[in-house]
Image: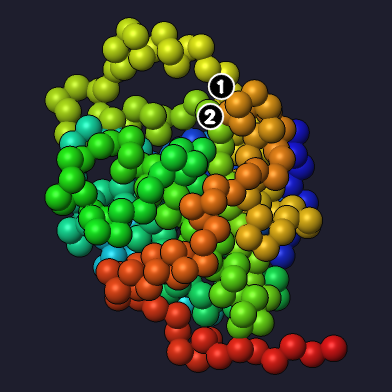
């Protein structure tokens, strides 16, 4: 099992930390000594997660703060509160997301729910937190993507699925490809500007969490249950629990040898289970022109851009 290095001097924000990989990441960061903000949409769920972690690690430094990544005003308020603390932010873990709601739904700002919650919200959060991150000695942003990014397509002519027929799976794949692109492009921006920021990404393979059912239950009168054929197909796929499934994200967030623009995932059968290895980045996330175009479009849609004082290249010394 991957052992998180000592993080006694680390201030971290983990989104979606009330369950699944987010809660596990928060737990293990706190166990390693970090002060962790559990950034959650529903504070009551965050408090339950905090209590569960404290039951195992009574000295964990945890606090719950609300952020709704499907609401840009909430993202701004959360980031402003972090900035008001005046504490440099060492680590941002972009973990939260929604998966495959059955019908097209919209965020508070009118974006398609998966594109808004999984990409545009985290994008805005990352940029708004940049001043706090760059005030830290060795800041890092670790973003959760997905193996589905391999078949994702960025539909620039219809990012929000307003004209084409909505597909829950393809919309999710687009949003997770966008996350991977964001991570890769942020690494490039950091290098071009001489920032000491490390941008990494991870995917969990097939990790058993409530992600597969919670999103699919949205808009339904009863919780989603896959049909027998789908259940049988899923049973054939190798899967793993939350503890091993969170390790690629923890590696991306804390490993001393994680690389700028690095991507990490399970190295076992079909890339769905197993110990963490360097994952292959799909070619669709490696085109600098496409990546820059998506970044610019995200800035336009969210109204959040690189802060002007930080956009100048910092001279390198030595």
Number of other residues with Cα within 10 Å of mark 1, as a class: few under 14, some 14 to 19, many 20 or more: some
> In screen coordinates, is 274 left or right of 51?
right
Instruction: State the count of labels.
Output: 2
Q: Say which quadrant the N terminus sits in.
A: top right
* Label 1 SS: loop
State the residue in front, 160 or 208: 160
Estimate the x, y position of residue 209 in percent, counting from the top left.
46, 29
Mark drawn on residue 96: none
Estimate the x, y position of residue 87 in percent, counting from the top left.
57, 75
> In screen coordinates, is 262 left or right of 189?
right
User: Residue sitting at 51 percent across and 75 percent down?
Assistant: 130
Most extreme residue toward the right, as rendered?
Answer: 318
Q: Are marks 1 and 2 in contact (CB under 8 Å)?
A: yes
Residue 203 vertical placement versus 189 (above, below): above
Mark drawn on residue 239: 1
Q: How is the image coloured?
A: rainbow
User: Residue sitting at 62 percent across and 80 percent down?
Assistant: 192
* Label 2 SS: loop
Q: Could you say which quadrant of the image residue 240 lies in?
A: top right
Estimate the x, y position of residue 27 in percent, counting from the top left.
60, 43
Can residue 77 be seen from the camera position used here?
A: no
Residue 109 vertical placement versus 43 (above, below): below
Can residue 246 be seen from the camera position used here?
A: yes
State the residue in front, 315 or 85: 315
Badge 1 or badge 2: first in the primary sequence: 2
User: Residue sitting at 63 percent across and 40 percent down?
Assistant: 265
Residue 32 vertical placement versus 306 (above, below): above
Number of other residues with Cα within 10 Å of mark 2, as a class: few under 14, some 14 to 19, many 20 or more: many
Q: Say which quadrant the C terminus sits in.
A: bottom right
Mark 1 → mark 2, Cα distance in angstroms: 6 Å
Q: Mark 2 = which residue?
A: 207
Residue 195 vertical placement versus 37 (above, below): below
């Amino acid at each position: 099992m991957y052992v998180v290095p000592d993080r006694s001097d680390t201030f971290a924000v983990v989104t979606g930390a009330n369950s699944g990989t987010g809660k596990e990441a928060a737990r293990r960061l706190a166990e390693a000594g970090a002060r962790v903000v559990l950034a959650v949409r529903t504070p009551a769920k965050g408090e339950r997660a905090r209590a569960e972690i404290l039951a195992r690690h009574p000295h964990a430094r945890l606090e719950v703060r609300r952020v709704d990544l499907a609401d840009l005003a909430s993202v701004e308020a959360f980031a402003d509160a972090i900035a008001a603390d005046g504490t440099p932010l060492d680590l941002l873990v972009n973990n939260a997301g929604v998966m495959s709601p059955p019908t097209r739904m919209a965020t508070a700002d009118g974006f398609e729910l998966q594109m808004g919650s999984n990409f545009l919200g985290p994008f805005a959060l990352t940029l708004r937190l940049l001043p706090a991150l760059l005030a830290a000695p060795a800041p890092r942003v670790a973003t959760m993507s997905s193996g589905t990014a391999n078949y994702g397509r960025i539909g620039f002519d219809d990012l929000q699925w307003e004209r084409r027929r909505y597909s829950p799976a393809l919309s999710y794949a687009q949003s997770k490809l966008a996350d991977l692109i964001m991570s890769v492009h942020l690494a490039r921006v950091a290098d071009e500007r001489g920032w000491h920021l490390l941008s990494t990404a991870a995917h969990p393979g097939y990790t058993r969490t409530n992600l597969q059912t919670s999103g699919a239950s949205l808009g339904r009168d009863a919780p989603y249950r896959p049909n027998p054929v789908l259940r049988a197909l899923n049973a054939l796929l190798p899967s793993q629990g939350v503890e091993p499934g969170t390790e690629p994200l923890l590696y991306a967030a804390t490993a001393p040898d994680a690389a700028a623009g690095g991507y990490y995932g399970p190295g076992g059968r079909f890339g769905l289970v197993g110990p963490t290895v360097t994952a292959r980045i799909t070619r669709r996330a490696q085109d600098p022109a496409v990546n820059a175009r998506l970044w610019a479009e995200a800035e336009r849609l969210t109204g959040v851009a690189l802060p002007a004082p930080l956009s100048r290249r910092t001279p390198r010394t030595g």
